[in-house]
Amino acid sequence: MTFAPPTISRIARAHLTQDLDLTVDELTSLLDLAADLKRTPARYADALSRKSIALLFEKPSLRTRMTFELAIQQLGGIAILNDAQIGAREPLKDVARNLDRWVSGIVARTYLQRTVDDLAKWAKIPVINALSDVWHPCQILADMQTLRQHFGELRGLKLVFVGDGNNVAHSLMITSARLGVNFTLASPPKYEASPEIIATARELALETGAEIVITNDQNEAVCGAHAVYTDVWASMGAENEAAERREAFADYQVDDDLMALADKRAVFMHCLPAKRGEEVTDSVVESANSVVFDQAENRLHAQKALLLMLLA
Ligand code: CP
Ligand code: NVA
């Protein structure tokens, strides 16, 4: 059976600097398009033909970097990579105004969210946040694609994030609220999410009926969860806090006992890279209900959809 291709609708905002730059309709269209890109990639082989995109990485990456590079190639475009601190050798505003004379888009992984925002301010071409200290929107697109693929329907699912209230948790919380996914964040005291982002998520959740719960009790949090998600305890840039964080997060490891409190069909999720023995045990990552490699796979398809909706 052949499916009609979904129309590629343009994203109204010029950039994806954070999750809120996509409307709920755009988010839903993007997930539909990502599913079609996964099913029939050949249909889109020339969709970015003759377009060049700059990939700027201030921090290491396996998944984001390779899937963007592959996505651009498989859509017929050209990816150009640069690893450097943006704005260290010359002012950021000059970097942005050089790039926009050469390429059609910028994908940037930065230490500071301000760097992504300033690139978007100065460049006349779309800027995509490939992870900053506050957000990781591209990851969450692939995560929602994975959940939709696994459960069929997102609305009404219970997604529990156990760990650091940081970039991945922020993006998950906002996008869950907007898609009607009940979201619980269980973090140790002092490592909760940004109060402003929690307030925004709660406001957005009023429209979808999603429940946003913030707690320090990881055992209670995972009861009835359809998905349990975690991330490293010390993110890139916080490596010097690793020892104190290991102590603070010690009770928040996702292990088989914690997973046993979740729903029987619950999946385990992780953005990767995972530190087995810290935030998650090897046994949970390798378990039959782990979808971590589906998430990684979907980075490719979700980012292709994003590139097409911003640039095609
Ligand atoms: N999940 C993720 O963004 O992985 P990388 O850091 O390898 O890109
Ligand atoms: N929170 C992690 C995510 C890595 C994909 C970090 O920022 O390092």
Image (cartoon, rainbow, N blue to C red):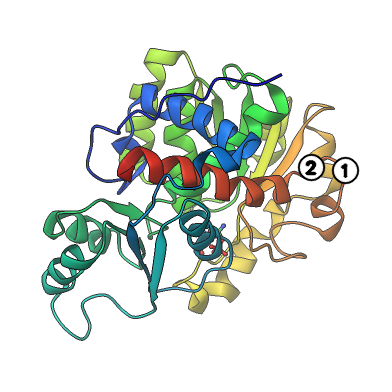
Q: Amino acid at mark 1?
A: Ala
The spot of residue 178 in percent (x, y) is 42, 24
Please determine whether, in this image, residue 57 is positioned above or below residue 194: below
* The CB of the residue at mark 1 lies under 8 Å from ligand 1: no
* Closer-to-camera residue (61/301): 301
Closer to the observer: label 2 or label 1?
1
Residue 121, quarter of picture: bottom left
* Distance Cα–Cα, label 2 vs label 1: 15 Å
Q: Which residue is mark 2?
A: 258
The spot of residue 189 in percent (x, y) is 51, 50
Q: Which residue is mark 1?
A: 288
Tag 2 near tag 1, CB within 8 Å = no
Q: Residues within 10 Å of mark 2 (few under 14, many from 20)?
A: some
* Closer-to-camera residue (226/254): 226
Q: Amino acid at mark 2?
A: Leu
Left or right: where 227 falls relative to 240: right
Q: Which mark is residue 58?
A: none
State which quarter of the image contains the C terminus.
top left
Q: Earlier in the sequence, mark 2 or mark 1?
A: 2
Q: From this viewpoint, is residue 50 visible?
A: yes
Left or right: where 273 falls relative to 77: right
Q: From this viewpoint, is residue 186 visible?
A: no
Residue 155, quarter of picture: top right
Please report the residue visible at 59 percent of the width from the left and 22 percent of the height from the top.
Answer: 154
Residue 224, quarter of picture: top right
